Image (cartoon, rainbow, N blue to C red):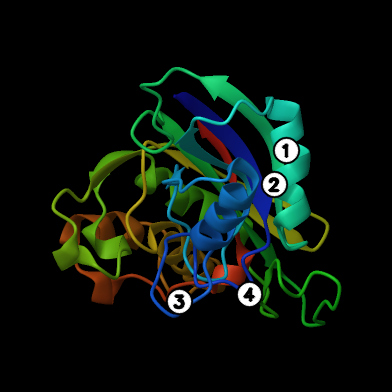
């Protein structure tokens, strides 16, 4: 029995997220069906991150086990043949039988793209959130420092009661300007449901002057979702890399 690791890129616009859901089109289901057509047997697909509906990925990692002898390079071509154009397998490799895409991950890197302009974009409309109000990125950077480290992120998830352990470690949170775009890059050992998008929404409120910089520390300590900012739209979020 072989264990195959896949590196996958996808646009999540037309999907109800990664995880298989009844009566909804998902990345996991679409990928699994394409793989099964190639290896001619049922497979169980494990993903490193359960991206939400509308969220994209440049570096999603998945693995499945198979008795097929098809070499990795041929697997890439064959699987992509059966996949729609908004999902692409970028790499495939044989790995140890014990490897698990989700449980072996050491950290994950997400990037949120914000267009800070009063004029919308057509070409990038599915890949960024547009905010037409002038944002103070210096204040946003100062506020972001309170989120770095190991904390209880109850205030930044919309499913607190469904999460047994709400403690996560943010290794870095960077905010960079590229022209009229503001890029939020977050690396952590794991994320709660809607955690990145809620952090971004809160930092946008800081940039607008609606939330004071030092109040982010108080919001974090309060463990109360109602005190944080709104959840930023899914389309601006992308899974960049999973580290092992």
The label number, if any, that marks residue 76 in the structure image: 1
Task: Specify which label sits upstream in the sequence, 3 or 1.
Answer: 1
Task: Specify which label sits upstream in the sequence, 3 or 2.
Answer: 2
Q: Which residue is mark 4?
A: 14
At a point 69% along the width and 58% down the height, the residue shown is: 182
In whole angstroms, how far apart are the C-alphas of marks 2 and 1?
A: 5 Å
Q: Secondary structure at mark 2?
A: helix
Q: Which residue is mark 2?
A: 79
At a point 26% along the width and 77% down the height, the residue shown is: 226
Q: Secondary structure at mark 3?
A: loop
In whole angstroms, how far apart are the C-alphas of marks 2 and 4?
A: 19 Å
Q: Which residue is mark 3?
A: 210
Q: Residue furthest top?
A: 96
Q: Secondary structure at mark 4?
A: loop
Q: Nearer the viewer, residue 240 or 87?
A: 87
Residue 244 visible at all: no
Q: Is residue 11 above or below residue 151?
A: below
- Viewer-side label of 1, 4: 1
């Amino acid at each position: 029995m072989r264990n195959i690791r896949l590196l996958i890129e996808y646009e999540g616009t037309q999907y109800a997220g990664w995880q298989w859901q009844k009566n909804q089109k998902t990345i996991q289901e679409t990928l699994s069906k394409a793989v099964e057509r190639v290896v001619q047997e049922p497979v169980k697909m494990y993903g490193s991150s359960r991206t939400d509906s509308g969220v994209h990925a440049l570096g999603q990692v998945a693995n499945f086990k198979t008795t097929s002898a098809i070499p990795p390079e041929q697997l890439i071509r064959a699987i992509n043949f059966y996949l729609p154009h908004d999902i692409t397998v970028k790499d495939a490799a044989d790995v140890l039988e014990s490897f698990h895409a989700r449980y072996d991950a050491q950290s994950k890197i997400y990037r949120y793209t914000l267009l800070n302009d009063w004029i919308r974009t057509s070409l990038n409309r599915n890949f960024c959130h547009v905010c037409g109000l002038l944002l103070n990125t210096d204040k946003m950077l100062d506020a972001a420092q309170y989120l770095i480290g190991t904390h209880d992120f109850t205030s930044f998830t919309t499913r607190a009661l469904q999460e047994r352990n709400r403690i996560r470690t943010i290794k870095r949170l960077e905010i960079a300007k590229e022209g009229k775009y503001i890029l939020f890059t977050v690396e952590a050992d794991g994320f709660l449901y809607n955690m990145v998008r809620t952090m971004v929404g809160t930092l946008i409120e800081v940039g607008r002057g609606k939330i004071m910089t030092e109040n982010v520390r108080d919001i974090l300590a309060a463990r109360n979702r109602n005190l944080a900012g709104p959840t930023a739209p899914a389309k601006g979020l992308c899974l960049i890399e999973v580290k092992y």
